[in-house]
Amino acid sequence: MDDAAQNRDQRLEAGELVRVSAAYEGASADVAQAREVARDFLDRLQAVHGLPVSTRVMGMVQLAVSELVTNAVKHAPGPCLLDLEVTAGRVEITVWDSAPVLPVARAADPGRVGQHGLEIVMAVCQGFEVHQEPVGKRITAVVELADDPEGDVAGRRP
C-alpha cells in the first residue's frame, strides 16, 4: 500500500469494537487494496477474535467496499478514507470522500450498462446511510455477521 496512509488497527477487549482504517490517494489501484484490507480484517476477526465470518459475509463486505471505494475514486477529487468496524454483531463499512454531492441510487434499468454500484450496495447490505460533512460526505453500509435473521452463522451447524 505505497499510496495509502498507514493503516490504524484497533483491537480492544472481547465484546468491544474492532476497527481498521486506511486512507487512499484516489487511484484505481486503491480499490483492490481496499478489498484486501477488508479481507485481511475479516480474516483477523476469525483468527484473533474468534468471530465467525461466513463466506457470504466475506463476499458482501468486500463487494460493498469495492463499490464504495470505486465511487469515491471515480467521482471525488483527492483522497478517500475507509473505516471497517465490528460492533454488536455487524460490520460497518464507512467511506469518506471530498465530493459534496450526495449519491442517489438510480431507478432499476436492466438496459443500463454500469452505474449500478450504489444499487448493489443497498441490495446486499442491511443498512445504508449517507451524511453530508463540512467537507465532502460519509457513506456507511452495514453487513450483519449472522447469516440469517435467527442468527445462524455458516460453520455453526447442529
Image (cartoon, helix red, strand yellow):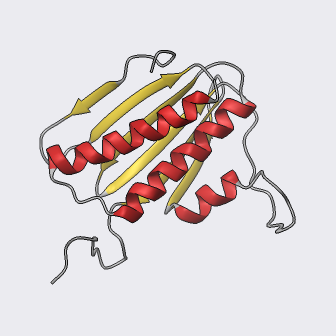
Q: Looking at the image, which residue sits at the far bottom?
A: 158
Answer yes or no: is residue 15 visible.
no
The residue that appears at 66% across and 30% down in the rendered structure is 73
x, y percent for residue 151: 28, 74
x, y percent for residue 52: 23, 60
Query: Compared to 63, does 20 lie above or below?
Result: above
Query: Compared to 48, does 126 lie above or below?
Result: below
Residue 96, quarter of the rendered image = top right
The residue that appears at 32% across and 63% down in the rendered structure is 54
x, y percent for residue 64: 54, 50
Answer yes or no: is residue 66 visible.
yes
The residue that appears at 74% across and 32% down in the rendered structure is 75
Q: Nearer the viewer, residue 17 or 42?
A: 42
x, y percent for residue 14: 12, 46
The residue that appears at 67% across and 52% down in the rendered structure is 118
**The N terminus lies in which quarter of the figure?**
top left
